[in-house]
Image (cartoon, helix red, strand yellow):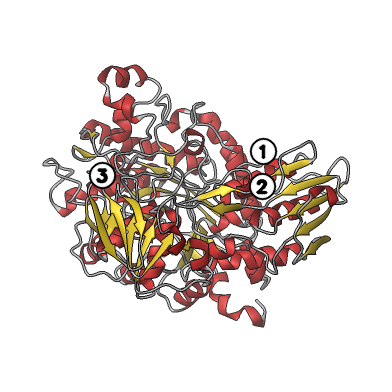
Amino acid sequence: MNQTNEKYEALFTPWKIGNVEIKNRIVMCPMGGTSLFGWFELGGCHFDKEAAKLFLERANNNVGLIIPGIAPLRDTFWGKWLWQNPKMFDELKEFMDEIHKTGAKLFIQLTAGMGRSWAITELIAPIHKNKFTRALIKPVIDTSHELASPSAQPSRWAHDITCPEMTVEQIHEIIEAFAKTAKLCRDAGVDGVEVHAVHEGYLLDQFAIEFFNKRTDDYGGSFENRYRFATEVVHAIKEICGDDYPVSLRYSAVSKMKGFCEGAMPGETYDEVGRNIQESERAAKYLQDAGYDMLNADNGTYDSWYWCHPPMYMPENCNLDDVAHIKKFVDIPVVCAGRMSPEAGAEAVKNGQIDAVGVARQFLVDPEWVTKLIDDRIEDIKPCICCHSGCFNFSSSKGHANTQDLSDTMGLSRCALNPQTMQSKKYYIEPAKKQKKVAVIGGGIGGMEAAILLARRGHSVTLYEKTDKLGGVFIAAAAPSFKEKDRELIAWYIRELKRYPITVNMNTEITDVKSLDADEIIIATGATAKKAPVKGAEKAVEAVEFLLGENPVGENVAVIGGGLTGCEIAYELYLNGKKPVIIEMQDDLVTTKGVCLANTSYLRDFFKTNHVPVHLETSLCEIKDNSITVKDKDGKTFDIKVDSVIMSVGYNSAPLAAKGRHIHVIGDADKVGNLRSVIWGAWNTCMKI
């Protein structure tokens, strides 16, 4: 490593898991959807060539250890056990030969299941509730098996569904399947396996946590009984694969749970109902002594999901203190994951607090980020903004199970910012058959993405932006204090534009597309804020105005609209010492489909914990000088004293021109969405030009 990279030097030293040496301290952590054996696909378990391509590209870019996403031991569709598919493991063996040529190592993560954390969808939930339809679809998908938990209890996702208690016979089947599948992995040249998981409130974790486990047999009650399932799994694997075959365990140090579907905030004093740090000290040592060779650790459960899948509201390195504490009680390597920064990770490794740094979604955004780190090209790393819009957009609100689209359920670990991730057959770069002059109107994220892609394909591109700044409405979206990664993304785009022969005309407003000398025109002019049709609306501050600091607000602030933007504004107000109150017409906050529950549950829990007033099923009637009048679901009107009102009630598309033969409208100008729809939409259009 050169002098400028000294602060990262500890990350690029070798270490061992059992007798397997890993070349550096960077671990690509498992993500649902990146399984080498497919994921929730109707065709059944198979060797997933798209995932294989993803991992090989990362292996060629200097990752030390790769752990693909969970591989269900029993296929979700059709119920076939993984060990019953030898052809798949033959293909895996060929793939492992390619991985080893890069110097990387790879462990396969095998899961016992999800139990009450199985993200049952709005489509499947009603089918499961009906005895007849449940029996009818059982040969295709056995929902009772997927939901089986240590004890009968409500589903995390559909509270009106009771998960059945798992039988001892089912437990033994799973233990046997772990062993048989691990042996096939070993024989295919896989460097080790990871057991999923005494972690995140998945099935083995539910058995381990007394809050979920009310059994009275050998798998419930005492500490030893609750951890019996996990210990019998590693015993079975070691018995068939040998003591020298490494077995990692995905592990949560602390559950961060206050109750059913209620998590703890960072720094909060609370009563832990899951695994507390004292039990974790004992459990980590107990699991090590049972035979586990590594702990791949963080915090949380599905009830405190923002610890396992930290959104942008969570602090960087949020799990490091607890994981570093657990390392004091074991002799095996410990990996820490959870918004880990390379700087903090390198320091923690150097100081012996952890053995390696676990990183997940940054690998989806930028497959070359480790190489760029080595080359000291930090600014070239495209940042993950922790949005979960493409990779893990399981969404839920009051009275709804997982509202995620089926196409997303079957296509996890895609990336909002990088359409090529896990979609290389759909999104790819190829030279244009005919080079054209293309005008892009609007320098927001959509316009910049379109300009870069068109230039990469060989077109001559001119970008027009009417203001003196690039970024569009995303400048406002990136303004809150907790959106540092969003601001890094804007800076990344501005630098990226300079890498290509793109003419950028700032302070240039286009009013007539016919005046442009172009073969094709891209309209990326975004959207305009909706107006609330209420008396006194002119007294309100628009969300964008507030975010840009153009219109200061008082101490007591009403936020009209409890969607994602409104909630983030209320969160920022609270962080800045203001007193927000949220007015929302729906029966819950952030009811939009596709916004990850990890993100939304943080905001809901934050407002609840910090006593931020939230008025649901309530509409705004009037804005007065020092108050607002609202109406609740029962028709009762009342006033709330406030100093200021911020309006966040959505947007309307604002295309400069209509679509035509050579005129293409993209992003919010076409249909208001999120960064994923903006970027993927830009590719959908620009690949055809």
Rounded to the nearest angstrom, the CA distance separating label 3 from label 2 is: 36 Å
Q: At which x and y percent is residue 136?
A: 34, 16
- Determine whether, in the image, residue 192 is placed left or right of residue 147: right
The quadrant in which the N terminus is found is bottom right
Q: Disc 3 or 2, which lies upstream in sequence? A: 3
Residue 258 visible at all: yes
Cβ atoms at labels 2 and 1 below 8 Å apart:
no
Q: At which x and y percent is residue 421?
A: 61, 47
Instruction: Say above or below: 495 vs 587.
Output: below
The quadrant in which the C terminus is found is top right
Residue 293 visible at all: no
- Determine whether, in the image, residue 434 is placed left or right of residue 165: right
Q: Which residue is at 32% across, 43% downward?
A: 117
- Give whichever of 339, 462 is nearer the camera: 462
Q: Amino acid at mark 2?
A: Pro
Q: Crowding near pointer 2: few (<14 within 10 Å), some, many (20+)?
A: many
Q: Which residue is at 59% across, 49% downward?
A: 55
For the residue labelled by badge 3, is the local secondary structure a helix, a strand or a loop? loop
Residue holding disc 3: 633
Q: Which residue is at 55% across, 64% downward?
A: 476
